[in-house]
Amino acid sequence: MIKTTLIATAVLVGFSLSNCSPNEQKKQDKPTTAKEACSSPMSAADSAKAMSTQIEIKGEVEHPLVLTVDSLKQMKVVDITDLKVVCQNGMAPKLGKSGKGVLLKDLLDKAKIIQKGHKDRNFYIVARATDNYMATFSWAELFNSNTGDSTFVMFEENGQPIKNTGNFVLNCTSDIKTGIRHVRWLKSIEVYRVN
């Protein structure tokens, strides 16, 4: 019975491969570049539509904020060196970059998360892009681990304002695969209480 199942599986696999068109087979054989492996290509027109000129900090905060690049420049700006983006598949299309930004936890401190007491720490934070891509953090990650000292809202890369991927990019430099929580076209930081 096991032998029959193995033969049937081999026949099905062979049949499905033979049904691929030559173009589909070429697509499968074509090596993927590092840039293609991390993200879907976006046209200049679509990138312009996704542009955000401000970031909202909202949700469970006492002082909702709307911040611009100029607002961030007035805060405690951090120089970030040796930036890299490593995708889920391990490829690294961006290496050795530098940037400027503000710690995410500093922005949250400015907005002041609504806590009902010292032990009220069950929050999660969503960094959302204009295309609805999201990265999440827990309160404990940002305020009780090294992640809080390595998660930035960036407005400058390699000495230049960020333009092609929105005015703001969120990056967590301590992640092993940094691309997963690398949020381009950042538009909001949202604080939610875990119920």
Image (cartoon, rainbow, N blue to C red):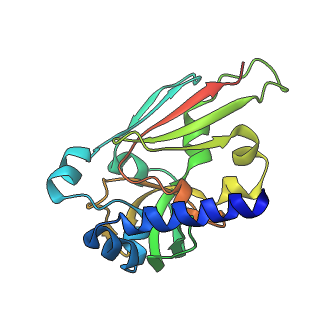
23 and 180: which is toward the camera: 23
Image quadrant containing the N terminus: bottom right
104 and 76: which is toward the camera: 104
Where residue 144 sits in the image (x, y, percent)?
Answer: 79, 47
Q: Is 52 rendered above or below residue 90?
A: above
26 and 134: which is toward the camera: 26
Where residue 44 sits in the image (x, y, percent)?
Answer: 17, 59
Residue 159 lies left or right of residue 154; in this view the side is left
Q: Is 151 rendered above or below residue 141?
A: below
Where residue 124 sits in the image (x, y, percent)?
Answer: 65, 34
Among the 4 quarters of the image, the one containing residue 123? top right
Q: Is residue 176 visible?
A: yes
Residue shown at the point (52%, 74%) measured from the top left: 84
Residue shown at the point (34%, 44%) measured from the top left: 68
> Which residue is most to the left?
45
Q: Is residue 32 visible?
A: no
